[in-house]
Image: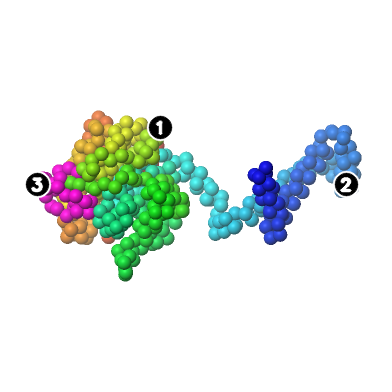
Amino acid sequence: MIKRSYYLKSLVKWFYPGMRVKRFLLIVLLGIIFMAVGLIYLIDLSGFLWIKNQIKNLFIYYSIAPLFSGLILLISGSLLIILGISNVNRSILKLIIPKQVDQLPEIIYEQRRLEKGPRIVVIGGGTGLYTLLRGLKQFTSNITAIVTAFDSGGSSGRLRDELGVLPPGDIRNCLVALSTEELLMKKLFQYRFSNGSLKGHSFGNLFITAMSEVSGEFSKAVEKSSEILAIRGKVLPSSIENVALCARLKNQQIIKGEDKISRYKSGIESIFLEPSSVLPSPEALQAIREADMIILGPGSLYTSVICNLLVKDVPETICQAKALKMYICNVMTQPGETDDYTASMHVREIIKYLPHNCLDYVVINSERISKKVAAKYQKEDAHMVKDDLPTDLDQRTKIIRQKLLSEYNFARHHSGRLAELIIDTIHKEKK
């Protein structure tokens, strides 16, 4: 009874002054009357004989044939209904999305096109993942970015230590990359305060932290942030447990903390989590199972990609999934993490943390960087990853070599070319 009263009040409000829909509803009503009268005229209904005769006399006066009289009424009624409904929609949508109402057909078409895109899960972090997501969102909205929340340095590390929240840095970057208003969101979410107690903190990290406090759960905070930013796809942490990323170096030294791992030059022998038994995000596992393609990388080999494979059940679920599996090799080595690593060494380390080699594709850039950019990286002791991979790694894994470089001041993957390669690979496999 209460619901019925509420709906009745809501219906009456449409007829309040200033709603700017009544005139268009009257046009719709007039169209319905025209159509009804047209049908009465065309169909022999004895109960409506008087109406039929009146219409007949009217059209005879204007010398219009009887058959065309009914058709004119039907067509006129249809046009009035279409005109009325379209103007009602326009009047309402102008309030909801005032700046985009003229682009509505294009927006709807684009969203429907993206909804039909392949289901892609991307596992990684950092700049590499940001670059890839920027490209993929142009082809599909069925994207799930699975990232770690193991940061221990910078703004993320400070928030983790001071407030006990999961570090939001990589998640922030993914939200920005998948946002439909990327340029504005990038300026806002990457903005860092330069003074006071907030010095060094980015607005995006503070936003996600505040959302976490309000919603009571980190995963819900990410979900709500995604809704507010209207992103294309989903961003999920591989685990919502507060753990530390550790590394055993080749000199057997143990390093605790993601930000400290790359400071040492002795090389990484293995990485592990502390505590070791870390439960995964159920949503992340579900996304992996339902994917058409699972992509590892690009990103820091150990601290962005492999660290996700340390979470319980994640590597097993990847290998058991029916999806295609692809590893995208980095363009450059990373000082303190992958010094002098070749492409085959990158691949070997990925496979080491999987139950077995379940990779279908390995992608490597075949384009050379300029001497100017190479010199810039050499100052930081970083070099282009040497392609020492065979034509095919084994009977299962195919090697894809393609020009994928986006070189301005940095040697990085071109987001558009990389995304096109991935989409083309999925389509070829489906044929």
Q: Which residue is mark 1?
A: 431
Q: How is the image coloured?
A: rainbow
User: Which amino acid lies under the numbered mark 1 shown in the image of this protein?
Assistant: Lys
Q: Determine the image quadrant of residue 309.
A: top left
Magenta residues, start to end: 248-271
Q: Which residue is mark 2?
A: 58
Q: What is the x, y in percent for residue 8?
A: 69, 47
User: Which amino acid lies under the numbered mark 3 shown in the image of this protein?
Assistant: Asn
Front position among marks 3 and 1: 3
- Dot 1 and dot 2 residues touching (CB under 8 Å): no
Considering depth in this image, is 79 or 356 the residue closer to the camera? 356
| Residue 300 seen anywhere in this rendered image of the structure | yes
Q: Determine the image quadrant of residue 355.
A: top left
Q: Which residue is mark 3?
A: 251
| Residue 417 seen anywhere in this rendered image of the structure | no
SS of the residue under disc 1: loop
- Dot 3 and dot 1 residues touching (CB under 8 Å): no
Q: What is the x, y in percent for residue 419?
A: 36, 46
Image quarter hosting the C terminus: top left
Give residue 405's mark: none
The 10 Å Cα crowd at callout 2, few under 14, some 14 to 19, many 20 or more, is few
